[in-house]
Amino acid sequence: MSRVGRHILDAQEARLRQQRRVSSISSIVIGLLVVGLVMLVLAFVLLPALNRENPPIVSYAGPQSENEEVKQKTRSQMKAKPSAPSMSAAKAIVADAASPTAIPVPEVDVSELSPDFGYGDDLGQGWADGTIDGMGGGGTTFFRQSVAAQRVCYVIDYSASMRGERDGLMRAELEKSISQIGPGMAYQMIFFAGPAWVAGSEVKMQGNKTATVTYKGRDYKWKTTGGAHAWEPVGKELKPDWLSGDGSRSKSLKHVKETKLVWGTDWEDALLMALDMEPAPQIIFFMTDGSTGGNMVKLAEDLGRKAKRTHTIINTVAMMQPKAEGAMKELAKRTGGQFSIVRKGGKVDLVPVD
């Protein structure tokens, strides 16, 4: 073989080796790329399955009252631990913080009740019959008149004309009524003759023209300008406080028994004293055995208008006194109250006011 031919053969073999190297490198690169692509696909498919966890359960709990928390703790203590491991594996997170997710809350209109009737002035049903239903507190009776209220004031005649049967009937019925006062009720007793005073006060008469009432260490003066039926306060007027049915009844019962009868009969100032209490009474039991002089029906109309302004019902009792019946009935009618007549012998008639 000539030198030129051999040189050509060597060059061809060199190009062939070069092509083989390029082909091998290309094959290796392509193989690596394929393997990498396969591994990437497997990673997307297999890795999420390997890292799977039980998702936490998040619930929203609104604010709870103290009673609800105690009840829930009691119920949780009574529950047995779950026996299934799959149940205990679930994680629960209870959050009472504000959540970024809006949760629709249904709007429910709830009508507001009139307050604690505590010492409010609202009236429930029963304006027409002298009772106030749904007020809480409790109820009581007085000469066949039944009431339910939180604030009851007694305006009772302790004049000298009550001596004898009237006095005994009045004290017995008043004791029974006070004994029925419930723990949730407020009450007061205002006694009157010529002057008017809160039960438990000391009353000193200076003849038949002036009187001094001492209540909680303060003196209140009274005088008459025209006999037994024209008494009026002089200077600062006495303002009664409410008593609680929780612990005042024993003292009140003692006052009912021991208070002495006094000269005079003037019930206008006693009723005004009751109506001026703060807050005003819801019910007044007003009992007298005599007339107060002058135009009693006109006086009853004026007192009835004032009672309506304070939302006070006045239940009236005429103790064996026909002259007072017209005014007493008118006062009860104007305020939506009840009217009773006590006959001789103690018989009590509940008289319609319409």
Image: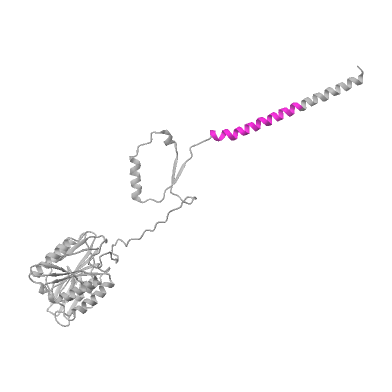
Outermost residue toward the bottom in this view: 226
Q: Any magenta on residue 28?
A: yes
Q: Quadrant of residue 286?
A: bottom left
> Would residue 238 appear left or right of 205 to someone viewing this image?
right
User: Going 89% across and 19% down the picture, which residue do you hit?
Assistant: 6
Residue 300 lies, in percent from the top left, at: 21, 76
Magenta span: helix, strand or loop, mainly? helix
> Would residue 206 appear left or right of 61 to someone viewing this image?
left
Residue 167 lies, in percent from the top left, at: 10, 69
Q: Quadrant of residue 177?
A: bottom left
> Above or below — where is 16 with respect to 126?
above
Q: Is residue 236 visible?
A: no
The quadrant in which the N terminus is found is top right
Q: Any magenta on residue 322?
A: no
Residue 57 lies, in percent from the top left, at: 46, 42
Q: Is residue 20 visible?
A: yes
Query: Where are the magenta residues, as a range?
Result: 23-50
The residue nearer to you, when weighing 252 against 281, is 281
The quadrant in which the C terminus is found is bottom left
> Would residue 324 appear left or right of 77 to someone viewing this image?
left
Residue 65 lies, in percent from the top left, at: 36, 51
Outermost residue toward the front in this view: 354
The residue nearer to you, when weighing 59 against 204, is 59
User: Going 34% across and 41% down the picture, which residue do you hit?
Assistant: 77
